[in-house]
Every structure is written in structure tokens, then in C-alpha cells.
Amino acid sequence: MKKKIILFINNDEIFTFPMVIFLINKLKKKFKIFIKLENTSFRKKIKILLILILDGSIFNLMKFYKKKISLKKIKNIKGVKILTRYDESDFKYGVSINYPKKIIFKKLKIYNFHFGNFLNQRGTFIFFYKYIFKWKSIDLTFHKINLFFDAGKVLSKKTIIIKNMNAIDIIALPLKNKNFYLNSIKIIGLKRKALKTKLGDIHREPTFFKIFSTFKKEF
């Protein structure tokens, strides 16, 4: 019998669904896959669009928009089910992909993909904080969620140079590194030493004032 897993995903047709459908097609022979959807807040969406406009990358968004994947296409995959409620005892583990809210759990092991290393890039809006901290590289990390924010055991990591990338280039990095996601999921359950990491500050969602003032300095 196939083991059941949950994918906690952002309800996003442009960047999240293309990644999810890739993973489903690779994993469906081994697992029975369930999906828990969550919407990004309207306020956060406006901030993301504002950054893309001020960064000059809004037009580059169109090439990804043209390749968007609908939720209907995911629902039509045999064996995939969208959840509204779930009993965590029914599942082997869960994986979070761009999920916009904190996941509440008791015993279910949940793993998360994150932009950034835990020393410098904990939190959200990494594509914005790049301009504040002048990061020249960024990490894709995969970790086991614990009670703290972006602080769990890191199972895998990939460092990417972002010196000349704009915000949309950074947001799109997962789609260009899909195999990192797939290979990271495949190591769940294997005996591996956690990658050494130190915890730094958490970067919260920036205010509108912070966004405008940062790009005013850039220009």
C-alpha cells in the first residue's frame, strides 16, 4: 500500500503549482498525495507586486505567467486529493512549499523548503532583503520544521549566486532548481547528519514605508 503524504502549498498558479505538478508526477508511483492549500493575503500580494515594479522586473513576470498551471490540472491527476481537513495520524509526513501560514502540528513530521541560510536569511521576502543586505548569494534549504521559525534540522542546501539577479529572478529560482526539491524529499527518512548552521535574526514582512524607502536609496 502506498504511504500517504501531505503537500502544504501556496494557492499560486505561477510559481508554486508548476513545481508541485512536477513533484507529483515524480512521486505519485510511490506515494498517495494529498494537498492542503492556503492563500497569500491580499496585502502581501500587493507588496510583492510593488517590489517587482520598483525593481523593474514586473515585465519579466509575464513569461512565467504564460506558463502558469491551473488548480484544475492538479485536481485531474489520478490519486491526488485536495484537503480541507486532515488527521495528521493518517500521514507519513508533510512537506511545505511556499505555504504562507504557520503550520500547526503535534506529531506529524513536516519539512519545509526555504530561501536562505539560517544565519542571514531566516524569514520571508528574501528577494527584497537582498537589496538591504547586499547579498551576493542565496541558499535553497530543506529543513525539518520545529517550534521555532526557520530553525529546524537542515537536511540539504544549495547555494546560488544572485549578485546580478532582480526580484523576479530570485522568486523563480525554485522552478530552475526543481530537482533540488525532488532529491530533498527523497532523502526524508534516511539517516543523515544535520548540516551545521547558526541562527540569525528573522526578517519579517516589510512595511510599505520600508519598501519605498529602500528603493529610493537604490535609485
Image: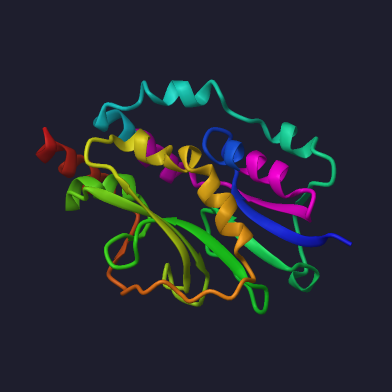
Q: Position of residue 217 (x, y in %)?
A: 10, 40
Left or right for 147, reference 48: right
Q: Is residue 51 magenta?
A: no
Residue 47 quadrant: top left
Residue at screen point 77% across, 38% down? 75
Inspect the magenta stretch and tell me whether residue 21 lies in it.
Answer: yes
Percent position of residue 88, x then y: 74, 70
Residue 65, horizontal then vertical, whole percent: 51, 25
- Left of 217 or right of it: where is 143? right
Picture layout, residue 108 above or below residue 135? below
Total marks in image: 0
Q: Quadrant of the C terminus?
A: top left
Residue 74 in sight in this render: yes
Start and end of the magenta stretch?
20-49
Give x and y (percent) for residue 102.
Answer: 53, 64
Tell me what residue is drawn at x 58 percent, y 41 percent.
19
Judged from this view, the residue extending furthest toward the right is: 1
In the figure, 140 relative to 62: above or below?
Answer: below
Judging from the image, the colouring scheme is: rainbow
Decide if residue 206 is in sight here.
no
Quadrant position of the N terminus in the picture: bottom right
Residue at x 60%, y 58% (from the top left corner): 185
